[in-house]
Amino acid sequence: MTKAAGAACRGRAHQTASSPCQDAVCAIGTPRLGIVALADGAGSRPYSHHGARLAVETTTRFVHRSLDRLLALADRSPGRVAEQILAAVLAAHRRHVRRKGYSIEDLACTLMFAAIENGQLLAGHLGDGVIGIRDNGTRALSVPDRGEFANSTYFVDSGSAAQRFRIYRQAVGPGCGVLLMSDGTADSLYDRATGTLAPAAQRMLGWADHLRSKELGRVLRANLEQVFSLKTSDDCSLAVLIGR
């Protein structure tokens, strides 16, 4: 059975300011397939926490509904997969701002997702987070994509988002694990100098082998709040997916 879980928590800066967590996660797990998505709202945008929530909810629904088609399309044209997912997210953002009266730029966020069905992995990554994978060893599948300037990156509303949204499609073995992490969490789990994951990343994937999805979500949240958030001022989020 696939397992999918995630959690997010406020960093010290947002706790001090009593402002909302701008990271969001969403997970869907069924006996047949699992999907996780993670988004990190732009710190400079006032409603990016809404944008991140809409992005992960829209992405998981879209991929759940269309996974077989997207897997086939990714073999021929991964760029079209990126375009379709971004189009769905931006449509959700536009509907939201029409009701609220502010700008779509106020919802800016990064986006990552991963889905596994019948030994087939589809994943996507836009922004400065990290995707780790356990399949014949544990390694970074997708590394941060930073912007032109320091502390900048690419968001779903960026003009180059479709070109920067990296799509991964591959066959994976039983028990393959995928770990999505925002940049706040990656500060502890990813070594930017060497491009490698910390041993703790492998331990987290090991927890998922023995815990049910709901319990795994509670354990991830506890670790984010009690360990990772103490090491950074940024919000922290994680999502874990284990294939059957």
Image (spheres, rainbow, N blue to C red):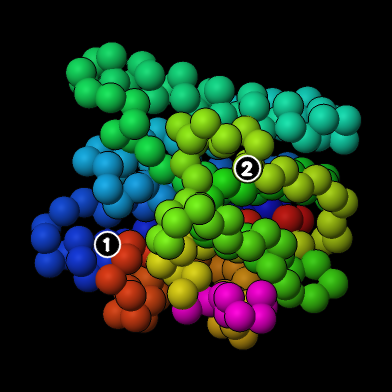
Residue 88 found in image quarter: top right
Q: Residue furthest left?
A: 17
| Amino acid at pointer 1 | Arg
The residue under label 1 is 10
Which region shows up in magenta? 188-196
Task: Look at 28% across and 14% down and name the residue there.
Answer: 98
| Amino acid at pointer 2 | Arg
- Residue 26 in view of the camera: no
Q: Which mark is residue 164?
A: 2
Q: Residues within 10 Å of mark 2 (few under 14, many from 20)?
A: some
Query: From the viewer's perspective, is 55 left or right of 235?
Result: right
Calculate the distance from the C-alpha at mark 2 to the C-alpha at mark 1.
Answer: 27 Å
Label 1 element class: loop
Of the image marks 2 and 1, the number of the one nearer the N terminus = 1
Q: Is residue 239 above or below residue 85?
A: below
Query: From the viewer's perspective, is 167 left or right of 76?
Result: left
Label 2 element class: helix
Q: Quarter of the image containing the C terminus?
A: bottom right
Residue 92 found in image quarter: top left
Task: Look at 27% across and 42% down and name the residue there.
Answer: 45
Q: Residues within 10 Å of mark 1 (few under 14, many from 20)?
A: many
| 191 in magenta | yes
Tell whether label 1 touches label 2 (CB within 8 Å).
no
Q: x and y percent of residue 96 in the render?
A: 32, 21
Residue 21 found in image quarter: bottom left
Query: From the viewer's perspective, is 162 left or right of 152?
Result: right
Q: x and y percent of residue 62 in the render?
A: 59, 28
Q: Is residue 132 above or below residue 194?
A: above
Q: Residue furthest bottom?
A: 199
Q: Nearer the viewer, residue 203 or 54?
A: 54
Q: x and y percent of residue 15 in the render?
A: 17, 65
